[in-house]
Every structure is written in structure tokens, then in C-alpha cells.
């Protein structure tokens, strides 16, 4: 938005549902965005449900042409056992 609150440009996450909590415009004109992806996972080996919904959090860097130039997904870095204080059964 400009000084008159008119939209000049916008960014959106690619391939995931955008999480509007935070974004950051980078000096190179790219934008860092938060996104989410809900997936169904069998958590019975952890004492959970066979069709549990797990939310992955994603950070994407989007360039001015709406290309993803960087992506980081929690699914690739965390396991369910990393949060032993969390109950997998609700």
C-alpha cells in the first residue's frame, strides 16, 4: 500500500494456504510469507488417531514474479516425538 492506502502490489503463498499472521518485505524486493498445509496422518503408532489432521507450517520467499525462491517446511525437520508434552489424543 502507498501513503494513500492504495494497493500497489501483493504477494501470496504458492501451493499452500497463506497464514496472514506475518510477512516481511526483503531489501531485494522479495517477500517472506507464512503458510500452512493440513495433511492426514496415521498416528496410531504414537497412540493417536489413524486419520489425524496435522498442520505443517511453511516459510516461503516469493519474488516479484510470484516464484518461490526458498521454502522451508516443518514436515521436513520435526517429528511427532519432538513434542512429548503434546497429547496426540483429544
Image (cartoon, rainbow, N blue to C red):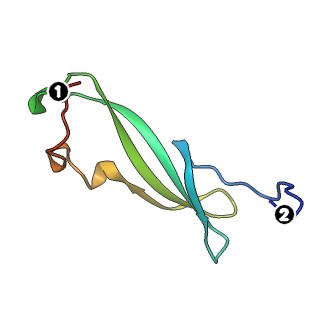
x and y percentages locating residue 47 in the rendered image: 11, 28
Q: Quadrant of residue 37?
A: top left
In the image, which disc is placed on residue 80?
none
Residues under labels 2 and 1: Cα distance?
49 Å
Quickly name the residue at label 2. 2
**Which quadrant of the rendered structure holds the N terminus?**
bottom right
- In the depicted view, which residue is nearer to us: 48 or 41? 48
In the image, which disc is placed on residue 48?
1
How crowded is the residue under tag 1: few (<14 C-alpha within 10 Å), some, or many (20+)? some
Element type at marker 1? loop
x and y percentages locating residue 79 in the rendered image: 20, 47
Q: Is residue 41 visible?
A: yes
Q: Quadrant of residue 44?
A: top left
Q: Is residue 14 left or right of residue 73?
A: right
Give the residue at x 18% y 34%: 87
x and y percentages locating residue 15 in the rendered image: 53, 43
Work out whether mark 2 precedes mark 1 in sequence or the reverse, and give the earlier one. 2
Which residue is farthest bottom?
A: 27
Give the residue at x 58% y 59%: 23
Amino acid at each position: 500500500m502507498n501513503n494513500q492506502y492504495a494497493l500497489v502490489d501483493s504477494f501470496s503463498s504458492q501451493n499452500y494456504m497463506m497464514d496472514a499472521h506475518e510477512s516481511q518485505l526483503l531489501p531485494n524486493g522479495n517477500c517472506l510469507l507464512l503458510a500452512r498445509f493440513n495433511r492426514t496422518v496415521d498416528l496410531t503408532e504414537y497412540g493417536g488417531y489413524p486419520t489425524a489432521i496435522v498442520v505443517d507450517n511453511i516459510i516461503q520467499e516469493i519474488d516479484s514474479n510470484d516464484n518461490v525462491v526458498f521454502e522451508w517446511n516443518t514436515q521436513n525437520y520435526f517429528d511427532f516425538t519432538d513434542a512429548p508434552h503434546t497429547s496426540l489424543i483429544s
